[in-house]
Image: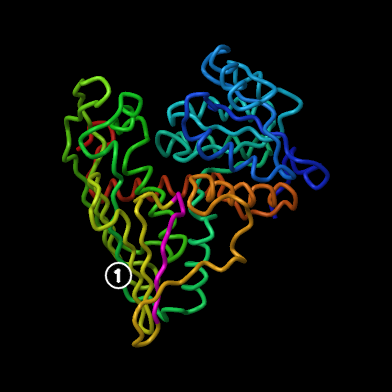
Amino acid sequence: MAEAGPAAKDAAQHSCGVGIIGLSANGGWASLAHLPALRSMPAKFDVVALSASSDKSAEAAAKAHAVSMATGDALVLASSGDVELVVVAVKVPEHRDLVQKALDCRKDVYCEWPLGRNTAEAEEMLDAARKSGVRHFVGLQARSSPALRYIRDLVEEGYVGRVISTRVTGSGGFPWSGQALASLAYTLDDSLGATLFTIPFGHMIDGFTWVLGEFAELDATMAVQFPQVKLTDTGETIAANGPDEVVVSGTLQSGAVASLHYTGRESPAGNLRWEISGDSGALLIESGSGHLQYGHLHISGGQGEEELRPLETPSIYRHCTTAADSYADSVAHAYHAVFEDLRTGADSAPNFADAVKLHRLLDRIRHAAGWNMESGI
């Protein structure tokens, strides 16, 4: 059992004070997912502070979201006595320095995925978090989604029997399909750590291996099919060196044969299709989005010779009041797990060690593909 961090002491008596680094008045993932997720559980969490890139933008965000404390200095947020859990929800290149500010203040921390720009940064952050003695969590929220937890249980309980093979096709979509917004241009630069490979594919392969187990052997191909990308809001064309095609195939430790193919282009046939075939049954997971972390999954299954039929995720897998089709739902279920970990000292929510493990798997895929992160070839 993990050592409880600062927020664990009184979690059973009051809601955990949360400070969000990166909450903006102008949209973004923090306002779309983190804030509604946290506010869906007022008995567990209270968003007491936010920080943004400047005092002015922080004040605008505080007014927009009714948060009492606002600052342009993340260290001021982390050092506040009212903040017990620091949430880092900004661009990946800023993660390491902002997480360190929380650790310097000995605050528990939740950082979005990818944890670092690369594995070395992630390993450095894990080491620092362990030395600080606080609890650390990472935004691999697909594992917390009710649908994926149900799928995992179905497989573990033998719904399909012995898994023989599994196949995934998925689409990352905008901004990895030849067009992007200027605000998302950084996701086209492989060295900055936030690409189709690390985000939609990264979330997918994390959930995939969480359900089916690790790869024993793998091969991979990665390519840039859109080396020039048009920014639709400025008209500018910029160079891209992050992969927009990723193919991984191999054998899992269970002996199952696996293949995954992610592309930047959206598909008219659906942007996520995951087949799990066993010797006595099959599962089909589909979604309009290639982002498994959103948790918007439709599950079908059949055993023996029966045709596939829809399988509804049982209500026992739901712990939150967020809408199942909202972006906040998987994140809310992740925070539910975080709160239970803080309260009991358990290790149910993904943490920095899980993030490092995923970073290393992505490195293994890069190596198999002969991919140089700096040059993008």
Could you say which quadrant of the image residue 375 lies in?
top left
Q: Position of residue 22 (x, y in %)?
A: 53, 27
Query: What's the image's color scheme?
Result: rainbow
Could you say which quadrant of the image residue 274 lies in?
bottom left
Q: Position of residue 352 (x, y in %)?
A: 54, 43
Residue 294: within the magenta? yes
In the displayed structure image, the side of residue 231 where residue 347 appears, left or right: right
- Quadrant in the picture for the C terminus: top left
Residue 199 higher or lower than 154, as above or below: above
Residue 145: within the magenta? no
Name the residue beneath numbered marker 1.
257
Label 1 Cα neighbours within 10 Å, binned few <14 / some 14-19 / many ≥20: some
- Quadrant in the picture for the N terminus: bottom right
Q: Residue at x 47, y 67 (%)?
A: 151
Q: Position of residue 371 (x, y in %)?
A: 24, 42
Looking at the rendered structure, the secondary structure element under dot 1 is strand
The foreground one among 253 and 136 is 136
Residue segment shown in magenta: 293-302
Q: Residue furthest bottom?
A: 305
The foreground one among 326 and 217 is 326
In the displayed structure image, the side of residue 142 where residue 167 appears, left or right: left
Q: Amino acid at mark 1?
A: Val
Residue 146 higher or lower than 155, as above or below: above
Q: Residue at x 69, y 47 (%)?
A: 339
Q: Position of residue 19 (x, y in %)?
A: 65, 30
In the displayed structure image, the side of residue 247 where residue 280 appears, left or right: right
The foreground one among 323 and 368 is 323
Could you say which quadrant of the image residue 208 lies in?
bottom left
Q: Residue at x 30, y 33 (%)?
A: 190
Give the number of marks: 1
